[in-house]
Image (cartoon, rainbow, N blue to C red):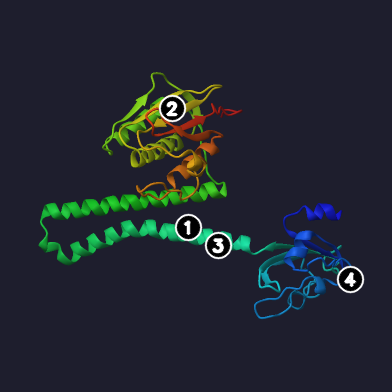
Amino acid sequence: MESRWLDALPDGVVIADAEGIVVAMNAAATRLLEHGNDDLVGAPLSKAITLQDLEGRDWAECVRPYDGIQTRTSLLEASWRATSGIEVLVTGALIRSRPAGPVEQVALSLRDGRSRQVVDRERSDLVATVAHELRSPLTGVKGFTSTLLSKWDRFNDEQKLLMLRTVDADADRLTRLIAELLDVARIDSGRLSIRKELVDATEVIGSQIETMNTAVDRIISINSDEPVAVWVDRDKLAQVMANLIENAVKHGQGDVEVTVRPAAGGGAEIIVDDEGAGIDEEIRPRVFTKFWKHGRAGGSGLGLFIVGGLVEAHQGSVHVEESPAGGARLRVRFPHGEPDILT
């Protein structure tokens, strides 16, 4: 392979022949291994890979790519340190022309360990966020149940009922959060299951609005006077609407209006308008990211991320705009989505 193609790769590449001599090394590898302007092609692999573990042992002495088990064909990714102390992640393949034959070529891939640190930090942030969201309702549940168990006789029936209702509400909150986290995991892993059927989007959304109107202190109205047929997962459509309306109620002011109409080219277009302060144009691209929060209304920051994942799974689109009332408008489009083969 020409060096210019290797130099185009973002990760470092080092290839050595059967004698342990470097036959190719790209610019990324030279930078990660901190060789400056030195050309290590033609040098021994042990001289090129100047990495050590945390105990100061050299990479070549520890890994011994040309020795060891004769059936070994790969090197698991491991963390090593360059001279400056920067972490370098190294993995590789041991090329043999026949099983248990001698190693004829070693191909190594190197990447900056700071990329893994970013992922680790994101995972830590995820754990911290989840722990924070779980702690609040659990604290309420634990507090009220402990109080009732230790001081049951001190409370009248009305007080007991109030505490039990609070515990029930906190338990519902925990259930919703766990369901959201499971949805996030399915979206992230690409395992989200979509079961499409032909539904009337107006009817599904109208039913969802009717249910939510009994639970909020705002008026949620639907602006649609005709059926809108679309192939979607009925439950996922209801979930999208629930999240959009909850977001509008939580962050907006005044009433919420939902418009359902046929989309250009087929399918359904759904518009959710609120009368709040709206969402600044520069931050609109971020609202569908995981754990995004805006304002002081709180919440898990997962609702709109799940909306984006569910809509994308239907090959649809969702955008943030400004509503005529000055608040936020979220516009969702679902394609008609008719399956190629009906069963």
Q: Please tell me which of labels 2 and 3 falls first in the chain.
A: 3
The percent coordinates of residue 216 (x first, y second) are: 28, 38
Amino acid at circle 4: Glu
Q: Is mark 1 on a helix, strand or loop?
A: helix
Query: Which residue is at the front of the view, 307 or 101?
Result: 307
Note whether 306 is above or below 219 in the view shown. below
* Residue drawn at (71%, 76%) of the image: 52
Looking at the rendered structure, the kind of residue marked 1 is: Leu
Which residue corresponds to mark 4?
Answer: 19
Q: Distance between the residues labelled 4 and 2?
A: 68 Å
Q: Which of 215 and 160 is in front in this view?
A: 215
Closer to us: 219 or 134: 219
Q: Which mark is residue 120?
A: 3
Q: Name the residue under label 2.
A: 201
Check disc 2 and give the amino acid type: Ala
- State if disc 3 and disc 1 touch (CB < 8 Å): no
